[in-house]
Image (spheres, coloured by chain):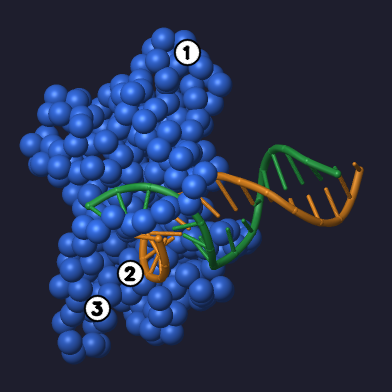
Chain colours: A blue, B green, C orange
DNA sequence: AGCTCTTCCTGAAAGC
DNA sequence: TGCTTTCAGGAAGAGC
């Protein structure tokens, strides 16, 4: 699944080939993942790529206005890879793989292809730098740009589970299940901890762990778990460095205890039960007991606020 | 505010 | 062996 390091890897690959190239044609297959397919098909051809940016897991391909268009608005193609999306540059003569749904023909005989078997990805066009900026503005902080103090400030008052907050794109953008689990493992924090109970020191540790994990993953060109590939079609190798994620039953690299899997924040979460002790057993026991009671005798009266 | 459930979709893995 | 069922998962929205 493409998360920040994978998307960053794709973006770097695209930066090596796309800027300066003009899109000479667009072909679309299935379009249910595109906001406005007609607009995309009519507005992209003739435009020249000027730059490529990443906002969290979103890819922003910025175009110059067409030479013949009078309004000097910048124009953006925004792509989210979802679970199985790929953006690759290939020779146009190469046969297209299964599930290739969008083709952007370049002026050098190659084409940018969007391939996505599950079509959980999204694609949209935005007119004007302001629109793109506004879109960018609704996202949370970039994990590699936020300061330790800001990180603390964003999390220390939240009563939600730390894992849920790491995954929340409005809090931080770009972190998904893999890097949430790897960061928490590195910081020795159980995913179900309530953020507000973690205190400044442990939040700082998490901030440091998160940055280290993401930086290392980018260096290794991301994790290829199911089918991530970069813009050239090559897999990453960070999956070999995973300490917790997708390693249920395997030994914790730190202490040898078997990695466990549990549902936290609605997602599979992998952690070491020894290095990452669950939050206060007493509290949990009390909460579980009251849940059990509530289930046995369905809610009597709702408390007013 | 925050949790859970549902929806989207397909391939892989499990079940029979 | 081969067919059928189940499930995962990023994000958004509903309902509680």
Q: Is A161 above or below relative to A272?
A: below
Q: Which residue is mark 1?
A: A257
Q: Residue at x 23, y 67 (%)?
A: A135
Viewer-proximal residue among A82 and A284:
A284
**Residue A103 location, x and y as percent?**
49, 69
Residue extending furthest top? A255
Q: Is A20 above or below relative to A141?
A: below
Pointer 1: residues within 10 angstroms few (<14), some, or many (20+)? some
Which chain's residue wears label 2?
A: A
**Residue A9 makes an appearance in the image:** no
- Given this view, does label 2 or label 1 mark the residue nearer the observer? 1
Q: Is A78 above or below relative to A282?
A: below
Q: Is residue A134 left or right of residue A30?
A: left
Which chain's residue wears label 1?
A: A
**Residue A134 makes an appearance in the image:** yes
Viewer-proximal residue among A21 and A3:
A3
Residue extending furthest left? A149
Q: CA distance from mark 1 to mark 3?
A: 53 Å
**Residue A121 location, x and y as percent?**
45, 61
Which chain's residue wears label 3?
A: A
Pointer 2: residues within 10 angstroms few (<14), some, or many (20+)? some
The reply to whether discs 2 and 3 touch (Cβ–Cβ < 8 Å) is: no
Using the rendered image, report if marks 2 and 3 lie on a common chain.
Answer: yes
Mark 2 or mark 3: which comes first in sequence? 2
Picture quadrant where residue A182 is located? top left
Q: Quadrant of the C terminus of chain A?
A: bottom left
For numbered disc 1, what is the local secondary structure? loop
Q: Residue at x 47, y 39 (%)?
A: A292
Q: Which residue is mark 3?
A: A127
- Given this view, does label 1 or label 3 mark the residue nearer the observer? 1
Q: Which residue is mark 2?
A: A77
């Amino acid at each position: 699944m493409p998360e920040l390091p994978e998307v960053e890897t794709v973006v770097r690959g695209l930066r090596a080939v796309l800027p300066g190239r003009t899109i000479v044609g667009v072909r679309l297959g299935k379009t249910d993942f595109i906001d406005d397919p007609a607009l995309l098909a009519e507005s992209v051809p003739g435009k020249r790529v000027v730059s490529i940016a990443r906002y969290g897991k979103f890819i922003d391909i910025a175009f110059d206005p067409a030479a013949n268009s009078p309004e000097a608005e910048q124009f953006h193609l925004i792509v989210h890879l979802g679970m199985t999306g790929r953006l690759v540059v290939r020779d146009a003569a190469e046969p297209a793989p299964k599930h290739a749904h969008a083709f952007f023909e370049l002026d050098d005989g190659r084409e940018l292809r969007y391939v996505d078997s599950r079509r959980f990805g999204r694609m949209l066009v935005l007119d004007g730098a302001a629109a793109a900026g506004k879109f960018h503005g609704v996202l949370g902080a970039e994990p590699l740009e936020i300061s330790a103090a800001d990180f603390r400030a964003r999390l220390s008052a939240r009563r939600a589970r730390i894992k849920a907050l790491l995954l929340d794109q409005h809090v931080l953008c770009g972190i998904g299940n893999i890097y949430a689990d790897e960061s928490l493992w590195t910081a020795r924090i159980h995913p179900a901890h309530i953020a507000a109970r973690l205190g400044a020191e442990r939040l700082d540790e998490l901030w440091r762990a998160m940055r280290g994990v993401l930086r290392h993953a980018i260096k290794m060109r991301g994790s290829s778990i199911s089918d991530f590939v970069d813009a050239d079609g090559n897999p990453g190798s960070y999956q070999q460095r995973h300490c917790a994620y997708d390693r249920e039953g395997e030994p914790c690299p730190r202490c040898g205890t078997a990695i466990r899997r549990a549902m936290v924040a609605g997602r599979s979460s992998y952690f070491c039960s020894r290095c990452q002790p669950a939050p206060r057993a007493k509290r949990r026991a009390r909460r579980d007991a009251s849940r059990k009671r509530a289930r046995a005798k369905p809610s009597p009266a709702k408390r007013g606020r």
